[in-house]
Image (cartoon, rainbow, N blue to C red):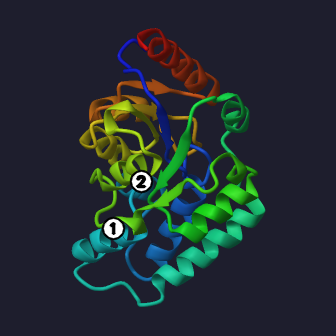
Amino acid sequence: MNQLTPYELVIFDCDGVLIDSETLASRIDAEELTRIGYPTSYSDVVLRFTGLSAATMRKMVEEDWGRPLPSDFDTIVQSRIKETYRTELQAIEGIDRLLHQLPLPRCVASSSAPDKLKLGLELTGLWRHFDPHVFSSVMVKAGKPAPDLFLFAAAQMGIEAARCVVVEDSIAGVRAGVAAGMTVIGFTAGAHCFDDHGQRLLSAGAAVVARSAEELGSILTVSQAISAAER
């Protein structure tokens, strides 16, 4: 915990950090890719594409497959994901309580499209904690692992990058936060996180890993106390 620097803004990823959506989306991605002739599994999708935008995933698949995905692929996938959200989506356990207790400014910076972001946060009751400070990769030139989205979020919130702490569950997100010059907390409370995921996040540059919302709250509290003492 003493690796964390003092901070003035907490930037949360959404999928797998606020809402337990990665298992749902990865399952659907795997099913639809396999259906069109690009066989893959749930675990492969989690390992390859977690944290990336749909456009980036599409580009990677097409380069690997050597052919374009069907023109309606994204529409079908997003429609299925939104339908599944309405029946299965849950907030990460304890995250609502953490957000109620967090006294400092916070925002969301996610690879998901704005409408999907809003739907997921509204269905889980978390939208009120962030509105209107919810930023999508469609707002910047390059998505994660590029630093653009995190730098954009910090600028919109009026906080310099060095005073931001990012909470991320993906390798791409951790790399983006590090590239932005921010402290990154890896987060492994999502159902999609395999046993070695925390170590993979540390290897990507996370300063520390939280395995639950409760543990994340403790880490943020320690860092906030350091920040207050230095003022």
The answer to which of 210 and 125 lies nearer the viewer is 125
Label 2, label 1: how many angstroms apart (C-alpha)? 10 Å
Q: Amino acid at mark 2?
A: Gly
Q: Decide: few, some or many residues near mark 2? Use Cα within 10 Å; few <14, some 14-19, many ≥20.
A: many
Q: Which mark is residue 51?
A: 2
> Residue sitting at 31 percent across and 72 percent down?
61
Query: Whole-percent x and y of residue 219?
Result: 52, 20
The residue identified by callout 1 is: 56
Query: Whole-percent x and y of residue 146?
Result: 27, 54
Going by the picture, which residue comes out furthest to the top?
A: 229
**136 to 99, vertically: above or below:** below
In what quadrant of the picture does the C terminus appear?
top left
Horizontal relation, residue 144 to residue 158: left or right: left
**227 to 87, vertically: above or below:** above
Element type at mark 1: helix
Query: Between disc 2 and disc 1, whose residue precedes?
Result: 2
> Residue sitting at 49 percent across and 63 percent down?
112
